[in-house]
Structure formats: C-alpha cells, structure tokens
Image (spheres, rainbow, N blue to C red):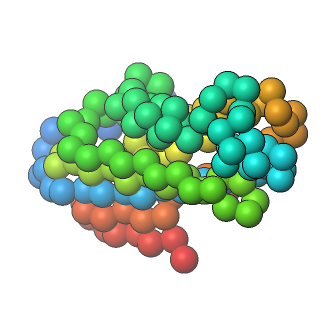
Amino acid sequence: MKKLSHINESGEAAMVDVSEKRATTRRAVASGKVLLNNQTIKAIKENTNPKGNPLEIARIAGIMAAKQTANLIPLCHQLPLSKINVTIEIKDYGIFLEAEVKTNAPTGVEMEALTAISVAALTVYDMCKAVQKDIQITDVRLELKTGGKSDFVND
C-alpha cells in the first residue's frame, strides 16, 4: 500500500514537508455554479437585489478567501500568491464563477482556487437569500492545474 502523504509514522495528521521540492510556476483554475431562479437573476441584472449587487462583492470575497486558504484548510501550506483572478458571469441558470490562482512555489494552488470559488459562491448565496430561499451551489471543481510533477485538465 502506498504511504499516505498527510499521515506521520505515529498515524497522526501531518503537513507534507515540501522544503526539498523545487519552486516552480504553478497555476490552478476552478469553477462553480450558483443556481438562481428568473426573479433573482432579474434582480441582479436590474440592480434591485435588496442587499445590493452580489457579483462584485463575491469577486472580492473569492480573492480574499484564496489568500486565507492556509488558515481554513488545516494542512495547506501558506503560499506566496502571485495572481488571483475571479470572474463571474450571469447565465440563464444563474451565476458561473471561475477562479485562476498562480504562484511560484514548491506546491500547487488547487486548494486556493477551490476556496476562492467556494467562498465566492457562498457570498452570492448570502447576498441573494432575501430574494430566493432555494439557491443551490453546484459543480465546484478543479478545471486544471499546471506546474509541479504533473498537469491536470478536467474534460
């Protein structure tokens, strides 16, 4: 059986030691959806949502969340992030979110991209819950990662 990377010899959770790994440019893109009804989409488009425009607030929340990932996910490394970009689009089903995160470090930024999407989606939820009670957050996923030992693209 392969040795578990986040378990030490005593069976305790442990952070992976990346001190011997070479720093490389790493990039991750994650995405997600917030499903909204037509009334909520209309309120966003017409800027009549009671809590204001959720899209810019969610974008900033996603950026802030990516920078806090190591504080939220216990075994994540604190990384010097060189780029965080969160884009948000209104679609016929609601909101599509995408986050791109980059660093030059010995470990990747997948968790930072996924955290950005999760918090951005939760922010849309929070900002729109006065209009719609049955909001759904779906399809949060890693789209791609580059750098490090292997690349990944989600088809």
In which quadrant of the rendered image does the C terminus lie?
bottom right
66 vs 21: above or below = above
Q: Position of residue 146 (x, y in %)?
A: 30, 64
Q: How many marks?
A: 0
Relative placement, left or right, of 45 versus 135 is left
Q: Position of residue 116 (x, y in %)?
A: 47, 40
Quarter of the view holding residue 25: bottom left
Q: Nearer the viewer, residue 146 or 9?
A: 146
Residue depicted at x 51% and y 71%: 154
Q: Position of residue 66 (x, y in %)?
A: 40, 36
Relative placement, left or right, of 11 versus 91 is left
Q: Nearer the viewer, residue 76 or 52?
A: 52
38 vs 129: above or below = below
Relative placement, left or right, of 10 versus 36 is left
Q: Nearer the viewer, residue 40 or 119?
A: 40
Q: Nearer the viewer, residue 18 or 11?
A: 18
Q: Quick check: can you spot residue 69?
A: no
Report the residue that reaches farthest toward the bottom: 155
135 vs 93: above or below = above
Residue depicted at x 63% and y 56%: 90
Q: Position of residue 128 (x, y in %)?
A: 73, 34
Residue depicted at x 53% and y 45%: 117
Quarter of the view holding residue 141: bottom right
Residue depicted at x 73% and y 26%: 50
Q: Quick check: can you spot residue 40?
A: yes
